[in-house]
Amino acid sequence: MVLYVIAVGLSVTMGLMGFVNLAHGVFAMAGGFILSYAMARFAVPFAAGLLLAFVLVAAVSVVLERFLYAPLYAAGELAQVLFTIGLIFASVALARFVYGTASAPVFLPDHLTGQVRILGRDFPAYRVFLIVFSAALIAVLWFGVERTRWGAMVRAAVDNRAMAQSIGIDTRRLFTLTFALGSGLAGLGGALGADILPVHWGYPLEHLVYFLIVVAVGGLGSLRGPFVAALFIGIADTACKYWVPELGAFLVYAATIALLLWRPLGLFGVRA
Amino acid sequence: MAPVLETRQLCKSFGALTVAERIDFALEPGARHALIGPNGAGKTTFVNMLTGALAPTSGRIFLGGEEITRASQAARVRRGLGRTFQVTTLFRSLSVLDNVALGIAEREGIARRMWRPASRFTEVKDEAMALLGTLGIAADAATRVQDLPYGRQRLVEIAIALGLRPRVLLLDEPAAGVPSQDSGRILEVLGALPPDIAILVIEHDMDLVFRFARRITVLVQGQVLVEGTPQEIAADPRVRSVYLGEAAHG
Amino acid sequence: MSGYSADTRVRWTEWLPWVVALAAFFALPEYLALGARILIYILFALSLDLILGYAGIITLGHSAFFGLGAYTAGILSTKLGINDPFLQLVAAAAAGALLGISTGAVILRTRALTLLMLTLAITAILLEVANKMSSLTGGADGLSGVQVNPLLGLFKFDLWGKTAFLYCLAVLFIAWFFVRRLIYSPFGAMLTGIRENTTRMHAVGAPVYWRLVLVYTISGTLAGIAGALLTQVNQFVGLNVLGFEPSGELLVMLILGGVGRLYGAFIGPALYLIAQDYLAKQFPEYWYFGIGTLLIVIVLFAPGGILGLLDRLKPWLPSSRPGSSARASAR
């Protein structure tokens, strides 16, 4: 589910904006670091820390977008891939330099730790919280994209940028805003998930495949897709580790390949 | 004479939206046929189904008597179906010569060869140059397509399609976007095309259509409204109401 | 440049890499180990350039072939006792080809992002497998003590790396010869067509999918050979030949030199590895940061890499450019 929050941001930037942002994990990592640092150094409460992660990462992403990403919107996939890989390398090195090799520790608030009883079975409270949060998020996002003017404008601008501009939509600002949202979500996801996916300098690369799998399987540009995909991956991964530990993550990869062969656009992919 | 290209009850729907409804169409060998209709009539959809870019919801397509409904794009090309695109689809940073040569090489099965240098296959180059000559753009052979004016790029589109030695040629708005002084050139070229190729042109330029076509099909909202000679079409009150009706509504 | 009017005679500048290599052999005997490494990565880069620069397939999983080839050679020697260098190369080539055709047939049905993700997934799978099957692969410790019999029964792999260097040079030369022929052939022109406008290629009757599978297989074969060379030269193979790092680094090397231009694959790895040898020792923390920044700078300001820059500075410099910009996009 952590994967979902992070990946939905990626689905947004890639699906809605058509930009291959492999460095998405960097924003997630940053969010995790921010939360950890804020809580440890400034005794910021958990919820406030999450908000801080979202806002700060979104803010930084705006700067990056304006100066580095924007010139590459028309540059083609290879340039975008290369650029974001470069960004990963640089960020990873920076993270290692600043933070060392240890993972960023996160202390969850008491009411979210421990177990919770649902329908007669014990579940880890935090994971339940994550699922609920993700579901809420999907609702908010869906509402935002499908029902608001903003959502319509983004969809129009992606469909035909020149056309959208000619009817007065400021595509520049729109893209920046959307990118900020996507990156902010990544930061939020990284912070939320810091307990489950430890945040350390190698984070963006380590989980790159998973982010991409969630987005590709879920379908670019869709909001429900990554949710289902993340759910599916989480279950498959847990099941696999429980029953057939020797296979490791192999099952997830194999299932991904099979799924994509069946539905090349992803489960809920909309763009041809 | 058996038609060289034929569709039977061809339909296409996207969910509740029907863009092609039971289209029966036949193209004779050597035809000079035009497909016209107001915007959104489904002309390009129809062409895409013919070439295999779009799969029909139902109906069948035949090329030279053989069914090609399920055949891939490349397979249809190999059986003699060539097309040009409404928006120029060329190898932009390659030379004009290379653009045409690639098609010829595919046709001859030369494109698979991995050892001998391409430039030694002089027959390909010669044929490409000859083709460019007949279209009057031999002088541009070494120029990169992206450096050519748009009107000449449209000619290169036609050259590539001709290089495939098609039996049927589908021209999707060959004069689209071409400044009016150059469209005369396009009409000349169309007129000089080999008589044994069956040609279907989709066009909005009525002047070009009436000077080029021997038969015209009018498509409205995915259905064939009427088909006949240019005189019949021009005189048909239904056609006039479709076009004038459009004008009346703005 | 490839194409039907290309001049295919070997230009004098094309002999430079070989002259430089031989000169290095005689003049810089202390650096032959680095030299062999450079040669191996040039071969690896050539294999990537075939699919990236010429066919336009963007992949981050090329290390899968490299690693497979490396482990094939290692396993052949340490587990099966087959120490003949040519047999090891052939086996690695076959392994690379098999992986190429099997994965290519699957992933080349997809495009862009999905394709990219699948290439990452495949290399991740191989890494998992290599890690888990430690009885075969030595797991995290790798396989040491790989033995390679003297070449042609005469030339032993000596401690100074002389034999290794010349061996790699010879293999690279042969590979270069074949790749160069391929690029100038009608097949090479066809690949350029696929990269430039895939829709158009379909519309001229090219069976695009099968051609891509074929070139992907050829590329995998070459990468597998490169991997085997690495094992033979180091007499060791470890997990670091798999995973994202080699793929990512290779991509940087190729972009640095210039994509789709045959000799970019020569210049890039040479510059990168020489710089890494010197700088990474001095400033290890800054190396990846520098590489990342360099990549960003290249993409934003010099997408054609070094060869692209040279093009802009000296219009009369001969090159093997197929007449395309390096901003190739997979369609």
Image (cartoon, rainbow, N blue to C red):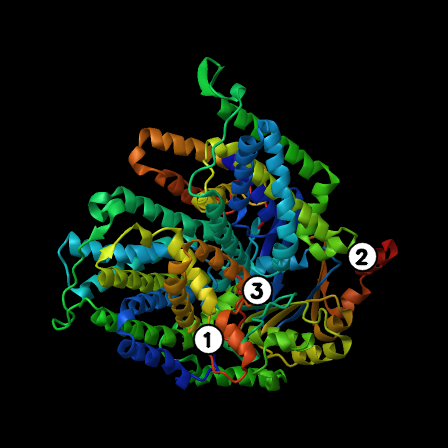
The quadrant in which residue B90 appears is bottom right
Q: Residue at position x 67%, y 71% from top?
A: B174
What is the CA distance from the residue labelled 3 to the residue labelled 2?
A: 27 Å
**Who comes first in sequence, dot 3 or dot 2?**
3
Along the horizontal axis of the image, is C205 left or right of B152? left
Per the image, the residue denoted by label 2 is B242
Select label 3 or label 2 by which is in front: 2
Residue type marked 2:
Val
Q: Picture coordinates of residue C125 (x, y %)?
A: 35, 46
The mark found on residue B105 in the picture is: 1
Q: Is there one chain holding both mark 3 and mark 2?
A: yes
What is the CA distance from the residue labelled 3 to the residue labelled 1?
A: 25 Å
Q: Considering the numbered disc 1 on the image, is that residue within a helix, a strand or a loop?
A: helix
Per the image, the residue denoted by label 3 is B5
**Who comes first in sequence, dot 3 or dot 1?**
3
The quadrant in which residue A256 appears is top left
**Who comes first in sequence, dot 2 or dot 1?**
1
- Crowding at dot 1, Cα within 10 Å, few <14 / some 14-19 / many 20+, comes out as many
Q: Nearer the viewer, residue A234 or C275?
A: C275
Q: Nearer the viewer, residue C15 or B49?
A: C15
Q: Is there one chain holding both mark 3 and mark 1?
A: yes
Q: In which chain is the residue bearing label 2?
A: B
Q: Residue at position x 64%, y 35% from top?
A: A141
Q: Picture coordinates of residue B120 (x, y %)?
A: 41, 84
Residue type marked 3:
Leu
Q: Picture coordinates of residue A106 (x, y %)?
A: 49, 31
Q: Considering the numbered disc 2 on the image, is that residue within a helix, a strand or a loop?
A: helix
Q: In which chain is the residue bearing label 3?
A: B
Along the horizontal axis of the image, is A263 left or right of C238? right
